[in-house]
Image (spheres, rainbow, N blue to C red):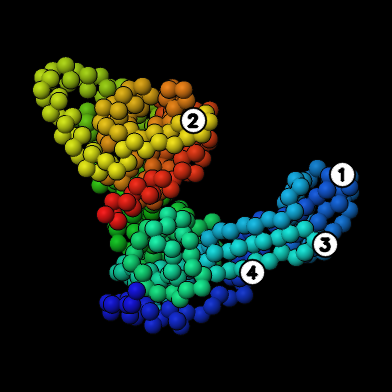
């Protein structure tokens, strides 16, 4: 779209003057980022470097090595013993730099193709630029992308223009250029060169606009910072007073997902969430399970005390809130020949899931989280794991079996959800289109 505001017009004029990547930056992308392959013939002991195209016969004593060095180009190569002859790899890279008082994040698509018998080919194409000033104003520049596309289907022949700030431009990158240049205000706010997230714009934007993120960064609570940046901001307002207490007592939050759930459970039990006795446990998981069981018993007593009419009214109110935010995902189901994944379509199903799996999917009010969708993975009717998907980033936040442990099918379940993430995204944008 055409730049409309004063800031957008300033960025549009500056982006054309942005210098190209330096030879050192290009060399880093070409040499460091892609995986370099050596094709080895197990029968003849001949190795083919897919970078320079050279071939040589390998010593029998070295034939079991997983990595070798090409005698011609000197490249360190990963050995591939399969019958595959050609390889193609694509990944996103980010370069952080400054220009005329702006923090600029430049995103490139690296495409590395190689084939046995010929030199490899590497291309580097720019797709997105994020421009931020010291006050946190964000302007997004991007080449065109196919409409209603969950995956970034870029039109590389298009011109870079000002775009609205949308999560689809918050690219998840594989590598970030190590020699980053940032504004002095970011150094002042605690940035030390570590990103703690694969979406760099989130860290930069939050450091410029949210003092709480600055405090977490400077206090060394890096796992909590990564959890907040990569997944959700839902908990930050609720747990922030407890975070401050942990910082004052030099307590490191090593399991932020369980710890945040623990704070919610303590609050629901009427415990003091600013008391280090409760919020600074030595074993977060055991403390979480202890108060989860206490909350379940308290919840049972509450249900016994309350009249049936009050119970029905409360569930009806929660169902109304749930249906307003999650009705478009009702009936969502997918799977493979062994595992079926389905959505939890009512508050009662959240209750049953939490009781059966002995975790806090209902008691920690996951059904009221606006940016969260909860799925249940089952095999032959037996519950395996409960999966939480972020509706903002379309990522799997967590997948947990009974007692918050991973089942033997954990990796297969997460892969299955990621492969079918487009089904969730299609339902998400269907409401927007209407």
Label 1 vs label 2, nearer the camera: 2
Q: Residue at x 43, y 48 (%)?
A: 422
- 73 relative to 251 in the view: left or right: right
Disc marking residue 339: 2
Which badge, 4 or 2, is on the more N-terminal residue? 4
Disc marking residue 54: 3
Which badge, 1 or 2, is on the more N-terminal residue? 1
Residue nearest the viewer, comparing 296 with 282: 296
- 68 relative to 208 in the view: left or right: right
Mark 2 Cα shell of 10 Å, populated few (<14), some (14-19), many (≥20)? some
Picture layout, residue 310 above or below residue 412: above
* Residue of label 1: 43
Query: Cα distance, mark 4 to mark 2?
Result: 44 Å
**Quadrant containing the N terminus in the rendered view:** bottom left
Mark 3 Cα shell of 10 Å, populated few (<14), some (14-19), many (≥20)? some
**Could you tell me which secondary element the residue under label 2 belongs to?**
loop
Residue nearest the viewer, comparing 322 with 278: 322
| Residue 24: x %, y % from top left | 61, 72
Check if mark 2's residue and mark 3's residue have beta carbons within 8 Å: no
Residue nearest the viewer, comparing 132 with 154: 154
**Could you tell me which secondary element the residue under label 4 belongs to?**
helix
Query: Cα distance, mark 3 to mark 1?
Result: 18 Å
Mark 1 Cα shell of 10 Å, populated few (<14), some (14-19), many (≥20)? few
- Residue 223 seen in this snapshot: no
| Residue 9: x %, y % from top left | 33, 80
Check if mark 4's residue and mark 2's residue have beta carbons within 8 Å: no
* Residue of label 4: 27
Mark 4 Cα shell of 10 Å, populated few (<14), some (14-19), many (≥20)? few
| Residue 118: x %, y % from top left | 77, 64
Query: Cα distance, mark 1 to mark 4?
Result: 35 Å
């Amino acid at each position: 779209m055409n730049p409309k505001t004063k800031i957008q017009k300033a960025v549009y004029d500056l982006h054309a003057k942005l210098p190209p990547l330096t030879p050192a930056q290009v060399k880093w992308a070409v040499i460091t980022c892609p995986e370099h392959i050596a094709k080895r013939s197990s029968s003849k002991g001949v190795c083919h470097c897919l970078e320079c195209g050279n071939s040589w016969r390998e010593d029998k004593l070295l034939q079991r090595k997983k990595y070798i060095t090409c005698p011609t180009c000197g490249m360190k190569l990963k050995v591939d013993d399969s019958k595959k002859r050609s390889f193609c790899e694509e990944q996103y890279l980010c370069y952080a730099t400054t220009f005329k008082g702006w923090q600029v994040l430049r995103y490139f698509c690296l495409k590395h193709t190689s084939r046995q018998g010929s030199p490899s080919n590497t291309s580097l194409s720019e797709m997105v630029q994020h421009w931020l000033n010291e006050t946190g104003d964000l302007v997004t520049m991007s080449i065109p992308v196919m409409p209603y596309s969950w995956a970034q289907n870029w039109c590389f022949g298009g011109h870079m223009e000002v775009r609205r700030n949308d999560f689809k431009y918050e690219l998840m990158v594989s590598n970030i250029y190590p020699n980053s240049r940032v504004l002095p205000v970011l150094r002042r706010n605690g940035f030390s060169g570590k990103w703690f997230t694969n979406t760099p714009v989130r860290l930069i934007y939050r450091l410029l606009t949210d003092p709480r993120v600055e405090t977490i960064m400077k206090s060394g609570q890096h796992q909590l910072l990564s959890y907040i940046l990569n997944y959700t901001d839902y908990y930050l307002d609720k747990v922030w007073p407890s975070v401050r207490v942990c910082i004052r007592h030099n307590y490191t939050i090593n399991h932020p997902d369980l710890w945040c759930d623990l704070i919610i459970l303590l609050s629901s039990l009427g415990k003091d969430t600013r008391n280090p006795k409760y919020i600074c446990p030595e074993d977060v998981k055991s403390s979480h399970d202890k108060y989860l069981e206490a909350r379940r018993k308290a919840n049972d007593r509450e249900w016994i005390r309350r009249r049936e009419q009050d119970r029905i009214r409360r569930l009806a109110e929660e169902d109304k809130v749930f249906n307003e935010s999650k009705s478009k995902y009702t009936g969502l189901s997918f799977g493979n020949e062994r595992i079926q994944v389905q959505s939890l379509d009512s508050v009662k199903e959240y209750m049953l899931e939490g009781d059966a799996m002995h975790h806090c999917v209902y008691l920690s009010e996951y059904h009221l989280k606006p940016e969260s969708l909860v799925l249940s993975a089952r095999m032959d009717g037996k519950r395996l794991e409960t999966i939480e998907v972020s509706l903002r980033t379309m990522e799997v936040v967590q997948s947990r079996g009974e007692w918050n442990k991973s089942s033997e099918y954990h990796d297969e379940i997460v892969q299955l959800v990621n492969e079918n993430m487009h089904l969730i995204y299609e339902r998400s944008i269907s409401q927007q289109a209407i």
